[in-house]
Amino acid sequence: MKLKYRINIIWSDENNCYLVGLPDFEGQQWRTHGDTYEEAFKNGLEVMEELHLAGVHGSIELPVAKTAETETLELA
C-alpha cells in the first residue's frame, strides 16, 4: 500500500520512548509509540494503515495528504 501521509517521530524523555504523530490526521497529537525508532516507525505505519482502511470503508473521512509543494504554498 502506498500511503503519502506524514509520520513524525520524536524521543520523549518523560515517556522514555519514541512518540509517533500523524499530523495529516486530526485528533490526538501522538498516535502510538515504540521503544526503538524502528519499532515506532513500524507502529506508526500500522496505525496509518488502520486509519486508511477506516477511510476506505467510510468510518472516517480521509484527509488530503500534504506534500512539500502544498507546505511551501502555505508558507508563502
Image (cartoon, rainbow, N blue to C red):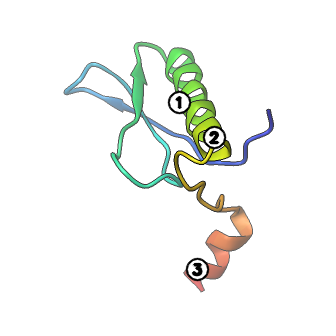
**Pointer 2 or 1: first along the chain:** 1
In three-dimensional space, the C-alpha distance between marks 3 and 2, rounded to whole angstroms, equals: 25 Å
Q: Nearer the viewer, mark 3 or mark 2?
A: 2
Q: Which residue is mark 1?
A: 47
Q: What x and y, as percent, mark residue 57?
A: 64, 41
Closer to the chain start, of discs 1 and 3, is: 1
Residue assigned mark 3 = 74
Mark in front: 1 vs 3: 1
**Residue 55 or residue 67, whichever sits in front:** 55
- Where in the figure is residue 64, as x and y percent of width and height? 64, 62
Q: Nearer the viewer, residue 25 or 74?
A: 25
The quarter holding residue 49 reads top right
The quarter of the picture where the C terminus appears is bottom right
Q: Amino acid at mark 2?
A: His
What amino acid type is highlighted by mark number 1? Answer: Val
Q: Where 31 falls versus 62 (above or below)?
A: above
Q: Which sits earlier in the primary sequence, circle 3 or circle 2?
A: 2
Label 3: few (<14), some or many (≥20) within 10 Å? few
Splitting the image into 4 quarters, where does residue 34 fall?
top left
Which residue corresponds to the image point at 52% horizontal and 15% vertical from the top-left?
A: 39
Above-or-below relation of 69 to 61: below
**SS category of the residue bearing label 2:** helix
Image check: 22 left or right of 54?
Answer: left
- Determine contact: label 3, label 2, CB under 8 Å: no
Report if the CB atoms under discs 2 and 1 are less than 8 Å apart. no
